Image (cartoon, grey):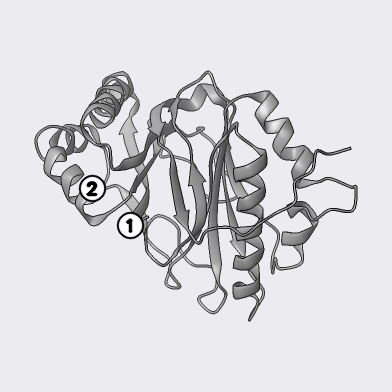
C-alpha cells in the first residue's frame, strides 16, 4: 500500500444534503475510473464528542473521509482526476479547513480491504487509537500481523481491518498525547451483524488457541479511545481487495468450539 489518509471535513448543516450528494457522485467516479483506489468512503460523525475527537462546531456536521492507494501511480491518477471536479466541489461546501493524517509505507503496518460497496446496509465502522508501552511496538506489530492472518483466513465478512503507525508529532487531525510513545490507528468494518459476531468469536475464543482480545491488551499503555459510527452514518464508499503492509504468516483458525 502506498498511501492511506484519514480526513475530517466540516460542513454547515444547510449544506449537508448537497455535500452528501456530491460524496455519492465522487464515489461513483472513483469506482468507475480509479482501480488503484482501494478505499474511498464518507462517514457522518455524531453531533457529540467521542473519546478520540471533539464534537463538531454548533450548526455544523463533521465527516470522516478515508482514502487508500496501492501505488504512486494510483495516487497521481486520483489527484489528476480530483482537480477536474471533486477538489473544487468539496472545498466550496466546507465551512472550515479540513484536517488530515497521512500514512505512507512503511507506516501502514498491516491490514486488508475486501471488495465491497459501503453504505447504511452494513454494520458499524469504528476506529481505535492504540498507545503502546515503551519498547514493545515491534512485538505489537508482529501480533497485529498474526491477527490479520486470522481475519484474512477466518473472517470473509470483515471488509476493512488495518493498523497504521501514527506520526510521533501527531497531526492537525489528531494530536499526539505523548511523542515518546508509539501509537497506532486501527480501523475496521464488517459486512453485517453475522460478520461482526464471527469476528468477536475469533477475537475472544476461550478454547486455548491464540486470539487477539487478550493478546493486544498486554501492550496497551493507556485505556483505548475510539469513535464508533452506526450503520446509518455511513454515507457511501467502496473498498477493493488489497493487502496492506506486512503480510501475515500461517495461523490456526480451527472453528471455535
Relative depth, front residue between 256 and 170: 256
Q: Is residue 95 left or right of residue 241?
A: left
Determine which of the numbered discs, if any, sits on residue 74 in the image. 2
Q: Residues within 10 Å of mark 2 (few under 14, many from 20)?
A: some
Q: Quadrant of residue 92?
A: top left
Which SS class for mark 2? helix
Say left or right for 18 vs 44. left
Label 1: few (<14), some or many (≥20) within 10 Å? some
Res. 54 in view: no
How many marks on residues? 2
Check residue 2 in the rendering and tell me which mark sits there, or answer none: 1
Q: Do the numbered discs 1 and 2 sit on residues whose CB atoms are within 8 Å?
A: yes
Which residue: 23% across, 50% down?
Answer: 75
Marks 1 and 2 sit apart, C-alpha to C-alpha, by: 9 Å
Q: Nearer the viewer, residue 162 or 229?
A: 162
Between residue 68 and residue 132, name the one nearer to us: 68
Q: Nearer the viewer, residue 20 or 95?
A: 20
- State whether residue 91 is above or below residue 73: above
Q: Is residue 131 left or right of residue 239?
A: right
Circle number at residue 52: none
Amino acid at each position: 500500500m502506498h498511501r492511506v489518509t484519514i480526513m475530517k471535513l466540516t460542513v454547515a448543516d444547510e449544506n449537508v444534503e448537497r455535500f452528501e450528494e456530491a460524496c455519492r457522485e465522487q464515489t461513483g467516479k472513483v469506482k468507475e475510473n480509479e482501480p488503484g483506489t482501494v478505499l474511498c468512503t464518507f462517514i457522518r460523525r455524531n453531533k457529540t464528542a467521542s473519546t478520540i475527537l471533539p464534537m463538531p462546531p454548533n450548526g455544523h456536521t463533521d465527516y470522516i473521509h478515508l482514502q487508500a492507494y496501492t501505488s504512486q501511480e494510483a495516487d497521481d491518477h486520483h489527484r489528476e482526476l480530483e482537480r477536474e471536479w471533486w477538489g473544487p466541489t468539496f472545498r466550496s461546501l466546507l465551512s472550515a479547513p479540513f484536517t488530515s493524517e497521512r500514512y505512507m509505507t512503511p507506516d501502514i503496518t498491516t491490514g486488508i480491504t475486501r471488495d465491497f460497496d459501503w453504505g447504511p446496509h452494513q454494520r458499524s465502522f469504528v476506529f481505535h487509537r492504540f498507545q503502546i508501552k515503551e519498547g514493545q511496538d515491534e512485538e505489537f506489530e508482529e501480533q497485529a500481523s498474526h491477527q490479520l492472518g486470522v481475519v484474512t483466513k477466518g473472517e470473509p465478512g470483515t471488509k476493512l481491518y488495518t493498523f497504521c503507525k501514527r506520526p510521533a508529532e501527531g497531526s492537525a487531525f489528531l494530536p499526539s498525547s505523548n511523542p515518546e510513545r508509539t501509537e497506532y490507528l486501527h480501523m475496521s468494518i464488517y459486512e453485517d451483524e453475522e460478520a461482526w459476531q464471527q469476528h468477536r468469536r475469533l477475537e475472544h475464543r476461550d478454547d486455548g488457541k491464540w486470539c487477539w482480545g487478550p493478546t493486544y491488551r498486554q501492550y496497551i499503555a493507556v485505556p483505548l479511545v475510539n469513535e464508533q459510527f452506526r450503520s446509518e452514518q455511513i454515507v457511501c464508499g467502496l473498498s477493493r481487495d488489497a493487502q496492506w503492509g506486512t503480510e501475515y504468516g500461517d495461523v490456526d483458525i480451527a472453528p471455535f468450539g
